[in-house]
């Protein structure tokens, strides 16, 4: 019998991930990770996302007490096998947006769940979604960069904000691009011994 999940610890300061978890009716405790997200040369974008999510979770686990379900996530934009993370400055944001203009890319969001305390369990999973950008004139890129929205987003855009106007189409889960695949998260919960309020065991 799975336990009803009513609260969770989020190892992130992301308001988007907080909002998505709260939309599931969860009481969310926010404990931002201090993990520095090194580039890990030689890692492919999928492995990079999974590694970052896992290390964020491990870092926060050392600082929480008692029994909790802890979740950490990481999003990486994959352009032809090259990982695009968060831009370090406006010039890099412009460069990323020029690279993405008129092209397909894949967004990978990985998450790690840790059930702390006695009987500790850990699980990592990943979901990927293909995104295509419109061909972007230079003035559109400049206008978007001027909003500062790109600066804390992988690939220098946020699909839930003004960045949605850059996207021609997506093939896959919208919430993966937003930064947290909530349906896949829910389907992993039974493997950790939990279920959402009122939820039956989801189909695999």
Image (cartoon, rainbow, N blue to C red):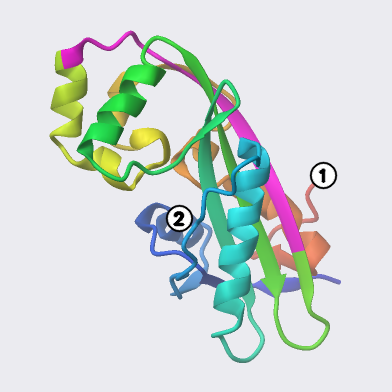
**Badge 2 is on which residue?**
17
**Sequence-earlier tag: 2 or 1:** 2
The circle on residue 203 is 1
Residue drawn at x 60%, y 83% is: 62
**Residue 161 x/y as whole percent:** 29, 36
Badge 2 vs badge 1, beta-carbon distance below 8 Å: no
**Residue 204 x/y as whole percent:** 83, 43
Write the start and end of the magenta stretch as one range.
123-138
The outermost residue toward the bottom is: 66
Q: Residues within 10 Å of mark 1 (few under 14, many from 20)?
A: few
Which quarter of the rendered picture does the N terminus lie within? bottom right
**Residue 42 x/y as whole percent:** 65, 40
Choose between 175 and 142: the one closer to the eye: 142
Direction from residue 145 to residue 195 in the image, left or right: right
Q: Residue 153: which quarter of the image?
A: top left
Residue drawn at x 56%, y 65% is: 56
């Amino acid at each position: 019998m799975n336990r009803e999940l009513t609260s969770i610890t989020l190892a992130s300061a992301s308001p988007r991930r907080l909002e998505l978890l709260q939309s599931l009716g969860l009481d969310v405790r926010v404990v931002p990770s201090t993990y520095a997200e090194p580039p890990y040369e030689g890692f492919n974008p999928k492995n990079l996302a999974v590694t970052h999510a896992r290390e964020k979770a491990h870092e926060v686990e050392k600082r929480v007490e008692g029994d909790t379900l802890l979740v950490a996530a990481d999003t990486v934009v994959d352009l032809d096998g090259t990982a695009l993370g968060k831009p370090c400055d406006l010039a890099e944001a412009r460069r990323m947006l020029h690279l993405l203009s008129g092209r397909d890319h894949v967004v990978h969001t990985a998450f790690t769940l840790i059930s702390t305390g006695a009987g500790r369990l850990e699980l990592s999973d990943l979901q990927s979604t293909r995104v295509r950008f419109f061909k972007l004139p230079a003035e559109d890129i400049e206008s978007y960069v001027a909003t500062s929205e790109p600066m804390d987003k992988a690939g220098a855009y946020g699909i839930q904000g003004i960045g949605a106007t850059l996207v021609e189409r997506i093939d896959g889960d919208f919430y993966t691009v937003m930064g947290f695949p909530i349906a896949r998260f829910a389907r992993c919960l039974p493997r950790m011994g939990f279920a959402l309020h009122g939820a039956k065991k989801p189909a695999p």
